[in-house]
Image: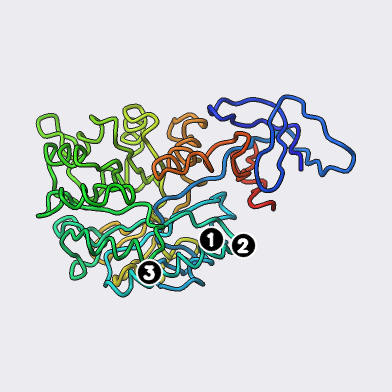
Amino acid sequence: MFLVNAAYLDQDFRPVRGDLEIEGGRIRQVGEKLSWSQNDLVVDCQGYTIVPGFVDVHIHGCVGADTCDGKRESIDAMAEFLLTKGVTSFCPTTMTVDRAEIEAALLAAKACVDQPGPGARVVGVNMEGPFIAAARKGAQKEEAILPPDPELFRHFQELSGGIVRLVDIAPEQPGGLAFIREVKDLCAVSIAHTTANYDQAKESFDAGITHATHLFNAMSGLHHRDPGVVGAVFDDSRVYAELICDGFHIHPAALRTAFQVLGDRALVISDSMRANGMPEGEPFDLGGQMVTVREGKATLANGTIAGSVSNLHQEVKNLVRFGIPLEQAVKAASLIPARSIGLEEEIGSIAPGKRADLVVLDENLDIVAVYHENQ
């Protein structure tokens, strides 16, 4: 298949005009004017923009389904919906729930990896909990919080077949630093739902943390005399930082600042929950707590923000509206999340040999087509 007469973002995320050839679900070649035969399928892109498929490494649920349902059918439903939004790869994300629920979720995700369905590709699991701080639990279930336990995590990783790509930790908890040192070679470790100060955060980065979960949320903020976790992340080039760009979790000015400071360490996540893609006003379960969505904002009964009902395509559009260049916004929603979990050689950018996960956008940045797994 050839996609011709397109504007696309090359492997360095520079806008260029040209053609792409896809063969066997991978990008075979790109160039200004490729040649094809009369037997080849040729699609005229009419000058539209082709960007890499989006990669969401932090998503709990959508369309009434949730990772912690512990059912393959739920993750399949998420995958099919996400593909319509340009998300071609994702990490179903667990919450701080009972051990048996986490185990069921891991087995369901493993089934999706072992035998992929028709939707977006499951590339691993993100474990948001249970090793977090109760004081910064947010919408997590307090009674399910556990102290850092490397052996328990090894059990989870082995049960999943080794597909856990991220695990969260509040590093200031007793045993937190030892946990990081013991599991950092098994997956990326992320600072999250934490009461840590600047020094504790920096110490955890030295121990092996390379990721920060939903920066600004459920952690200490930036103050000029007390830089907090946010300041520690800004100050350390080893750490990637998730940003929820729905316009509710982080003010646009703070997002602009974060992108300026972080550069290629900023990555876009949805942190979406099961109400995403469903009618507003009716309550939905999130990790054992009820969440209601009004005017696009998901909250618990006490007003605590509880995940989002956004998606990476919408958040890229938001970022452009907030003043972030399209190229940087797309990179933060594709290559950077892929890189943060070690998959940048397979997905995340438009380059020969990589998977042909592609999203075609019109002049309004609306989705015209999604290419994924030869479809």
Q: Is residue 178 left or right of residue 374?
A: left
Categorize mark 2 by other alpha carbons within 10 Å: few (<14), some (14-19), many (20+). few
Foreground of the two, 350 or 352: 352
- Which element type, helix, strand or loop, lies under badge 3? helix
Residue in view at x 64 percent, y 35 percent: 49
Q: Are marks 2 and 1 in contact (CB under 8 Å)?
A: yes
Q: Is residue 230 left or right of residue 274?
A: left
Locate residue 48, reporting x and y percent. 68, 35
**Which residue is identified by label 2?**
118
Q: Is residue 295 visible?
A: no
Question: In the rendered structure, which amino acid carries the disc numbered 3?
Answer: Cys
Total numbered labels placed on residues in the image: 3
**Which residue is identified by label 1?**
79
Foreground of the two, 56 or 150: 150
The numbered mark, 3 or 2, whose residue comes first in the sequence reads 3
Residue 68: give its label. Answer: 3
Residue 24: give its label. Answer: none
Residue in view at x 29 percent, y 70 percent: 289
- Which element type, helix, strand or loop, lies under badge 2? loop
Categorize mark 3 by other alpha carbons within 10 Å: few (<14), some (14-19), many (20+). many
Quadrant of the snapshot with the N terminus = top right
